[in-house]
């Protein structure tokens, strides 16, 4: 038997009573906190001229579609994106307010319908890879395979043309694929996927750094060297992107509001709600209950993949709480494809904590006469 089979797949099996009490109290606190509506839901003013509209799409979707159509007519990405940002009141400073050109350049070459097919195939690959991992990981219970259904529910949006235009959707699918592919002895496939995701959205950098750290801990020096090379290439690409944005920025172009939102846990819950299948009619309190349970499930999964998944989820949650503004809710698409996998382990985790809490205290040893 492997070490995972000998120890068991659950970190919370046999946990002490104080730890169980602490985790259950934290779980309850996060659920209650997530139900608090600190801000009114964003309402779109359909009459404002600052709301982009194109081919039945609105907002960011329409903005990127307009950029795509101009590129298909021969205009350069940076000229097109600068014009549309100015027209609809989007900032052009700092340079990170402008997305990298990779996705639009690809879509302008193959067309939006082909791009939708491509991303649908990526979603299907993610499902196949995750089913393989959930059925082959040592020690996992048989019901773990149903976690792929929780992925499938939230990957349906990649089959929509308007969501293909959102960089976070594609990056989130690629992160899901990379996690499913990651193996200490075979890091190259996951590395290639993360490199592609970095080219689409720079917010994938924390995942790349995490994988690079894992390679360093494993003393896989070839992988470490490859990650360093990817980091250098990423920095060079970002510098070129910054220079290209600077070439089209005018003195009167507006700047961004900054990303030190400090909007807390409720902001993170709203991000997950607004970027997952829950947005189709489910109230926010549903997300407030499910998200902490999903994180608890990730916590209980004792494995390399479980640990990586937990760090990715908690790391982005912290970033959304600290840095994101309420209108950055599309960032949730980076984590939603894999977040709810944790729900398949949540019942066992919750049961283990309750059993630990109800376990009788050890009777003190009798004193000798």
Image (cartoon, grey):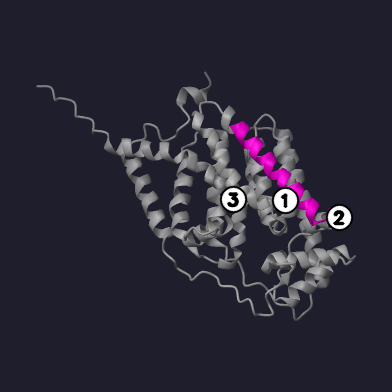
User: Disc 1 marks which residue?
Assistant: 198
In terms of sequence position, does the residue under pointer 1 or pointer 3 come before the other? 1
Q: Secondary structure at mark 2?
A: helix
Q: Tally the marks.
A: 3
Which residue position is annotated with label 3?
A: 335
Instruction: State whether residue 255 appears in this view.
Output: yes
Label 1 element class: helix
Looking at the image, is 228 positioned above or below residue 249? above
Pick the residue in front: 124 or 102: 124
Residue for badge 2: 109
**Distance between the alpha carbons at the discs numbered 3 and 2:** 28 Å
In the image, 31: left or right of 149?
left
Q: At which x and y percent is residue 298?
A: 50, 41
Residue 147: quarter of image: top right
CA gap, disc 1 to disc 3? Answer: 15 Å
Q: Which residues are magenta?
A: 110-133
Q: Say whether disc 2 or disc 1 marks the residue closer to the N-terminus.
A: 2
């Amino acid at each position: 038997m492997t070490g995972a089979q000998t120890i068991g797949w659950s970190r919370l099996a046999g946990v002490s009573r104080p730890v169980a009490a602490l985790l259950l109290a934290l779980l309850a606190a996060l659920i209650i906190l997530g139900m608090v509506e600190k801000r009114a839901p964003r309402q779109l003013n359909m009459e404002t001229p600052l709301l982009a509209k194109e081919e039945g799409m609105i907002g960011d979707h329409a903005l990127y579609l307009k950029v795509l159509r101009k590129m298909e007519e021969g205009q350069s990405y940076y000229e097109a994106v600068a014009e549309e940002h100015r027209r609809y009141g989007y900032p052009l400073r700092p340079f990170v307010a402008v997305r990298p050109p990779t996705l639009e350049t690809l879509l302008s070459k193959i067309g939006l319908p082909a791009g939708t097919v491509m991303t649908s195939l990526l979603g299907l690959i993610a499902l196949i890879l995750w089913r393989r991992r959930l059925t082959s990981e040592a020690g996992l219970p048989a019901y773990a395979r149903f976690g792929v259904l929780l992925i499938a529910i939230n990957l349906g949006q990649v089959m929509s043309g308007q969501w293909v235009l959102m960089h976070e959707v594609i990056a989130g699918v690629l992160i899901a694929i990379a996690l499913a592919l990651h193996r200490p002895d075979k890091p190259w496939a996951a590395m290639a996927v993360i490199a592609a995701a970095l080219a689409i959205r720079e917010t994938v950098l924390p995942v790349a750094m995490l994988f690079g750290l894992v390679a360093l801990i494993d003393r896989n020096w070839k992988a470490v060297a490859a990650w360093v090379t990817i980091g250098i290439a990423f920095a060079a690409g970002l510098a070129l992107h910054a220079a290209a944005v600077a070439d089209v920025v005018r003195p009167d172009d507006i700047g961004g509001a900054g990303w030190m939102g400090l909007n807390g846990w409720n902001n993170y819950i709203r991000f997950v709600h607004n970027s997952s299948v829950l947005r189709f009619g489910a109230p926010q309190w549903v997300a407030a209950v499910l998200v902490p349970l999903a994180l608890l499930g990730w916590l209980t999964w004792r494995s390399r993949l479980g640990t990586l998944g937990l760090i990715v989820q908690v790391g982005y949650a912290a970033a959304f709480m600290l840095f994101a503004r309420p209108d950055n809710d599309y960032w949730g698409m980076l984590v939603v494809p894999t977040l709810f996998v944790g729900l398949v382990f949540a019942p066992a985790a919750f049961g283990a904590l309750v059993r630990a809490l109800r376990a009788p205290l050890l009777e003190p040893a009798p004193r000798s006469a």
